[in-house]
């Protein structure tokens, strides 16, 4: 996607380019690897410039999903368009009227999440049989979304979003939940990260047959930091949450600051819901490994869990976020 912004007096336009990546036979690349070449096969400028900036783009089960707008000539705000590659060009198949300005798009199978600069995230479903984008649910509270991604834990699907207040929230869509309201996402967890996250990347976690398929989200921040957010089983979560509560008072902290207060969600406006404090700070949990054996045994005895079980949870947490 491309944005052509000339000046404040001129309307911004956009373009979409499609490139083909092919392997070059008989030519070796760096360290004996295969060599590739990139060839442009389509440009929307050959037909007509798009009358709105292209703000996000991603694939959708063989289709191309493009977020456009807004511009003065469009009714409403941004729009989502679904394009199909037909006879060496892009052909529009469906559209969806979004809100103010879409900043990020992510897809998994037929599900789509889009983040808005003011209206938080929306969960959509692509129906190929009727070629339609259907709104499943959205977050009703205002939120300026920087990045979003999907999290998977077995049969459970979550949506993670970061905002301009350096927070991260995880939403779920469960119509069978007693907390569910019509076409509204439920916030299941929130935390203050302390830095703005501008990119999430899904990554498969090691396969555990009793847990099913799991997908973690690695992230990058605007100040150059890297991190990861991974789902936990219910048993491991309750065990590590109890350990985290003990570590707050059992070990000294930098400058005497309370890590639980630092990680508390910080809303832009007044808080219109309860805190969903279901995040665990791995930096705090990792301090358990640096304690002497006697203190480790003492904390394990206070939790009424064996020390080996706690070490096993910490090891699984470490291994699940490694990129190899």
Image (spheres, rainbow, N blue to C red):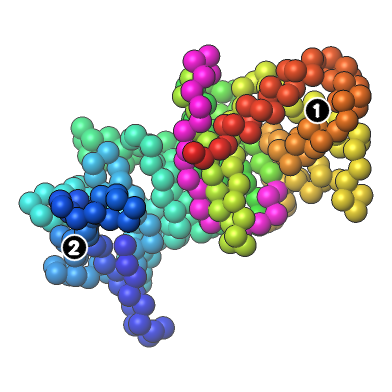
Give the residues drawn in magenta, as a range: 192-211
Any part of residue 95 in sight: no
What is the x, y in percent for residue 90?
17, 54
Q: Write down the quadrant of residue 1 in the picture.
A: bottom left
Q: Residue at x 81, y 44 (%)?
A: 259
Q: How crowded is mark 2: few (under 14 residues within 10 Å), some or many (20 or more)?
A: few
Per the rendering, the mark at residue 40 is: 2
Q: In this view, does 18 lie above or below 149?
A: below
Determine whether the residue tagged by mark 1 lies in a helix, strand or loop: helix
Q: Residue at x 29, y 49 (%)?
A: 33
What is the x, y in percent for residue 104?
44, 53
Per the rendering, the mark at residue 243 is: 1
179 relative position to 87: left or right: right
In 3D space, how far apart are the residues under numbered discs 2 and 1 (Cα atoms)?
55 Å
What is the x, y in percent for residue 110?
33, 35
198 relative position to 277: left or right: left
Q: Residue at x 32, y 67 (%)?
A: 2
User: Which of 192 and 40 lies nearest the eye of the viewer?
Assistant: 40
């Amino acid at each position: 996607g491309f944005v052509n912004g000339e000046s404040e007096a001129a309307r911004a336009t956009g373009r979409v380019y499609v490139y083909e990546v092919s392997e070059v036979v008989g030519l070796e690349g760096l360290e004996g690897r295969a060599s590739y070449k990139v060839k442009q096969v389509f440009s929307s400028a050959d037909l007509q410039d798009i009358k709105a900036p292209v703000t996000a783009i991603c694939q959708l089960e063989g289709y191309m999903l493009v977020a456009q707008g807004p511009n003065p000539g469009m009714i409403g705000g941004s729009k989502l368009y679904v394009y199909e590659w037909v006879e060496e060009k892009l052909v529009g198949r469906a559209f969806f009227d979004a809100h103010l300005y879409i900043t990020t798009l992510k897809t998994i199978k037929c599900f789509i999440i889009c983040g808005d600069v003011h209206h938080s995230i929306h969960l959509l479903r692509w129906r190929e049989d009727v070629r339609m984008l259907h709104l499943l649910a959205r977050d009703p509270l205002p939120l300026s979304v920087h990045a979003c991604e999907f999290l998977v834990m077995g049969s459970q699907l979550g949506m993670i979003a970061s905002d301009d207040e350096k927070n991260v929230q995880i939403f779920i869509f469960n119509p069978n939940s007693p907390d569910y309201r019509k076409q509204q996402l439920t916030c299941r967890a929130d935390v203050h990260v302390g830095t703005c996250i501008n990119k999430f990347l899904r990554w498969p976690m090691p396969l555990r047959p009793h847990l099913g398929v799991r997908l973690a989200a690695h992230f990058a921040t605007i100040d150059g930091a890297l991190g990861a957010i991974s789902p936990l089983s219910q048993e491991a979560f309750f065990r590590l949450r109890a350990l985290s509560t003990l570590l707050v008072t059992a070990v000294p902290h930098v400058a005497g600051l309370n890590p639980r207060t630092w990680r508390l969600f910080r809303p832009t406006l007044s808080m219109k819901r309860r805190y969903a404090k279901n995040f665990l700070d791995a930096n705090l949990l990792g301090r358990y490994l640096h304690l002497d054996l006697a203190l480790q045994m003492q904390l394990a005895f206070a939790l009424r869990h064996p020390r080996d079980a706690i070490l096993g949870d910490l090891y699984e947490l470490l291994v699940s976020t490694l990129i190899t």
